[in-house]
Image (cartoon, rainbow, N blue to C red):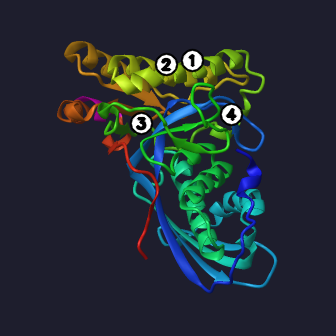
Amino acid sequence: MLVEEFIPNTPSKNIGSGAIGFSSPSNIALVKYWGKRPHQIPANPSISFTLSNCKTNTILRYTPKSTDDFSFDVFLDGNKQADFRPKIQQFFERILPYAPFLKSFHFDIETSNTFPHSSGIASSASGMSALAICVVALEELICIDLDSAFLKRKASFLARLGSGSACRSIEGGLVVWGKHNSIFGSSDLVGFQFPFEVHPVFKDYQDAILLVDKGEKQVSSSVGHNLMHNHSYAKSRFEQAHKHMDQLIPILESGAVQEFMNIVEKEALSLHAMMMSSDPYFILMKPNTLEIINSIWAFRKETQIPVCFTLDAGANVHVLYPKQYTSEVEHLIKGQLSVYCQNGQYILDHVGLGAEPIKI
């Protein structure tokens, strides 16, 4: 796969004003991506569950114009957000070679999240993927004879240039991003659905997101990624990620939940170990993060219920479990784990279908 395939070369037509809407979910990585090369290329492959309830709804309103510049306004929940402009400007500049029509319109970008904006859940994956697929849907209106499968692949390609993990939110289920020798067709440029057989237990996996800390992280993910360049353990970490990808292929096919939990938890702790051993070092976990992890381990040992945790680049805990144990795990969360959440807040989610159009 080459970047040149995403440069438009089909006939186009003029269109008037209009609006396009898409919702796109967040995702939670099972094998983590941490460290990247220029142009948003991952240092190692990753695989994630696409979520369902935690999503961004975006409406892109477009009006033709004649000036040769970017023109847009951004609204969150109906309120203009000037502080969002720099990131959108940077995104448009990055994708302009692949979407040259962007300078031909003024855009009103109306966005809202189904989860609290300040909840501590990274909204860049859902937000950038929703905007990217709106841009590609606009290209579909302008250009002639574009294949729908190609358009979804291009949306993932563009989303990656806004936020690396956003490329994993276009498709549903299990999504792979990054070149891996055991997965034919895998690419650093786009995310695509896991191509092997998946056991039914993993098709409706549940994810309860425990909101330990809703504040802004003291170290951004972008800074954290860059600290991997000269990290003492970077090479070993990248090798570990490739090994875990290999191990997950038969695990996801067979439904081996115990082995699945072992890899997922090891990946979460490896991610944070990289943060704690970088230069400069930092810690994003909070005391309550550790309280939740220890409580999950104790519950699992006592009940033999296969519930495990994973973490993103923050303090919040994702509690993963098969759907058949929903009642028991929700009882654990409500009765024991919610006390470690900020204001007792948590979100119940599950594996979802990816980006979907919004009727306007």
Q: Position of residue 178 (x, y in %)?
A: 63, 35
Say which amino acid is labelled 2: Gln
Sequence-first tag of 4 and 2:
4
Mark 4 or mark 3, earlier in chain: 3
Tag 4 residue:
225
Which residue does the numbered mark 1 point to in the structure image? 243
Under circle 4, the secondary element is helix
User: Looking at the image, is 82 positioned above or below residue 285?
Assistant: below
Q: Nearer the viewer, residue 178 or 58?
A: 178
**Callout in the foreground (4, 3):** 4
Name which residue lies at 72% across and 54% down. Answer: 5
- Of callouts 2 and 3, which one flags the residue occurring earlier in the amino acid sequence? 3
Closer to the camera in the image, 334 or 36: 36
Residue reaching furthest to the front: 145
Q: Earlier in the sequence, mark 1 or mark 3?
A: 3
Q: Mark on residue 212?
A: 3
Distance from the alpha carbon under mark 4 to that under mark 1: 20 Å
Q: Amino acid at mark 4?
A: His
Q: Which tag is nearer the camera, tag 1 or tag 3?
A: 1
Q: Circle 2 is placed at which residue position?
A: 247
